[in-house]
Image (spheres, rainbow, N blue to C red):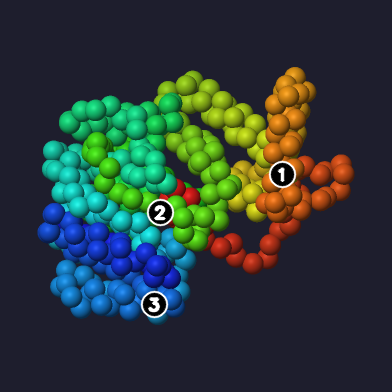
């Protein structure tokens, strides 16, 4: 039995397509749990209509609005005790008809498999390449090393993967709150003790044109922060000490060079807040001294390539005239760097679930 779970909040524009994709599966032995997180846009009515038509659908309505991660965790507590595998399908995504069937087949190769993934399709691009083509399960640790060493990212989003249900049932809440990309970190944690299987087919569609959280943060280029966090936290768990230390140094340098480019392009306050919030999950703050050093390196590169620099400046001015660039005027001696955040007396809001946040 497969438990399919769709938590939703105000996704009326996409929810019917999502539900239809689940009901169209060639694999029929599933329960479908829809969890309404206080929607106000008509999503509830859509879910009710489908629940009335198909006995496999169970609709749960929240009485109190929860954070995104809390809603996902709550939804996962509803899966049946008889469930063997669990598939999250986010409400603005959908899955292709063979998704459940092929993922179950992959799982059934071995009881040692804890996580299955596949290619996904987003914005017309097939993603998830880099996994060797073979039918036998992979060592989870080897897949984690492949990601750490080469950046091969087979996890996509919660819609992309399928979990062994016992892993969810033994660890509730399943996604850890307070992390930037809870789903990626959960995959890495699973790979420490379980094997991995991959279906070399496109099995899910991830929407990129909605107005969800993902649209807000996509411009902040979260993949750079994602990789920095994962390498800093997990390199020592999967790699030898010397290799882990060298990789952490390299990725830190790459990440701060990326931030330096952002500073020289006058990135808006939201960009810096997003990255500073992510760094806090590592108990780090923005290293302004190291950032200035990387800015100096970038300036030298710009001076050495005046033609390229002129083209970039012209492009920036064009975007500013079109109203894309933000007004970030600050004091001249600190014009490019973000100002340190003041301490807040209120509680920090929960961060969005990782792949719903940007992937």
Q: Residues within 10 Å of mark 2 (few under 14, many from 20)?
A: many
Query: Could you tell whether 292 is left or right of 215 in the image?
Result: right
Q: Is residue 68 visible?
A: yes
> Mark 1 or 3, which is nearer the eye?
1
Tell which residue pokes out farthest to the right in this image. 332
Of mark 2 and mark 1, the one earlier in the sequence is 2
Give x and y (percent) for residue 98.
18, 49
Disc 1: CA contacts within 10 A as few (<14), some (14-19) or many (>=20): few
Tell me how far mark 2 sits from mark 1, CA to CA.
Answer: 29 Å
Which label was assigned to residue 246? Answer: none
Q: Is 276 drawn above or below residue 231 in the view shown?
A: below
Real-space Cα distance between discs 1 and 3?
40 Å
Numbered mark located on residue 42 in the image: 3
Quadrant hosting residue 41: bottom left
Q: Are marks 3 and 2 in contact (CB under 8 Å)?
A: no
- For residue 207, the mark is 2
Q: Is residue 9 above or below residue 350?
A: below
Q: Position of residue 329 (x, y in %)?
A: 81, 51
Rendering quarter of residue 59: bottom left
Q: Residue at x 71, y 58 (%)?
A: 343
Query: Can you see residue 170?
Result: no
Whether the residues at callouts 2 and 1 have beta carbons within 8 Å, the answer is: no
Q: Which percent across, then down, holds residue 152?
A: 39, 32
Image side of residue 248 versus residue 184, left or right: right
Q: Camera-side residue: 178 or 309?
A: 309
First reached walking from the N terminus: tag 3 or tag 2:
3
Question: Residue at the location (53% across, 22% down)?
Answer: 246
Earlier in the chain: of badge 1 and badge 3, it is 3
* Residue beneath disc 1: 318
CA gap, disc 3 and disc 2: 20 Å
């Amino acid at each position: 039995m497969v438990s399919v779970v769709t938590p939703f909040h105000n996704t009326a524009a996409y929810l019917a397509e999502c539900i239809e994709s689940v009901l169209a599966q060639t694999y029929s032995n599933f329960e479908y749990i829809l969890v309404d997180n206080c929607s106000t846009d008509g999503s509830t009515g859509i879910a009710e209509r489908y629940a009335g038509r198909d006995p496999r659908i169970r609709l749960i309505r929240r009485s109190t609005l929860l954070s995104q991660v809390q809603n996902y965790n709550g939804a996962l507590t509803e899966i049946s005790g008889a469930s063997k595998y669990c598939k999250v399908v986010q409400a603005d995504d959908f899955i292709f008809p063979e998704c459940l069937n092929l993922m179950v087949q992959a799982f059934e190769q071995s009881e040692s498999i804890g996580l299955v993934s596949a290619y996904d399709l987003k914005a017309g691009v097939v993603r998830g390449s880099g996994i060797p083509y073979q039918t036998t399960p992979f060592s989870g640790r080897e897949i984690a090393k492949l990601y750490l060493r080469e950046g091969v990212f087979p996890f996509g989003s919660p819609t992309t993967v399928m979990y062994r249900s016992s892993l969810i049932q033994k660890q509730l809440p399943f996604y850890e709150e307070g992390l930037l990309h809870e789903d990626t970190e959960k995959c890495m944690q699973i790979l420490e003790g379980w094997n991995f299987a991959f279906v070399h087919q496109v099995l899910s569609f991830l929407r990129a044109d909605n107005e969800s959280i993902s649209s807000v943060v996509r411009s902040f280029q979260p993949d750079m922060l994602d990789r920095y966090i994962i390498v800093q936290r997990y390199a020592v768990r999967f790699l030898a000490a010397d290799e882990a230390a060298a990789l952490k140094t390299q990725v830190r340098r790459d990440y701060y060079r990326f931030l330096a480019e952002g500073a020289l392009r006058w990135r808006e306050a939201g960009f810096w807040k997003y990255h500073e919030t992510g760094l806090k999950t590592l108990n780090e703050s923005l290293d302004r001294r190291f950032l200035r050093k990387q800015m100096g390196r970038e300036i030298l590169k710009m001076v050495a390539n005046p033609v390229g620099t002129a083209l970039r400046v012209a492009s920036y001015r064009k975007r500013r005239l079109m109203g894309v660039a933000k007004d970030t005027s600050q004091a001249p001696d600190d014009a490019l760097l973000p100002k340190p955040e003041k301490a807040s007396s209120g509680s920090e809001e929960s961060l969005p679930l990782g792949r719903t946040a940007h992937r």
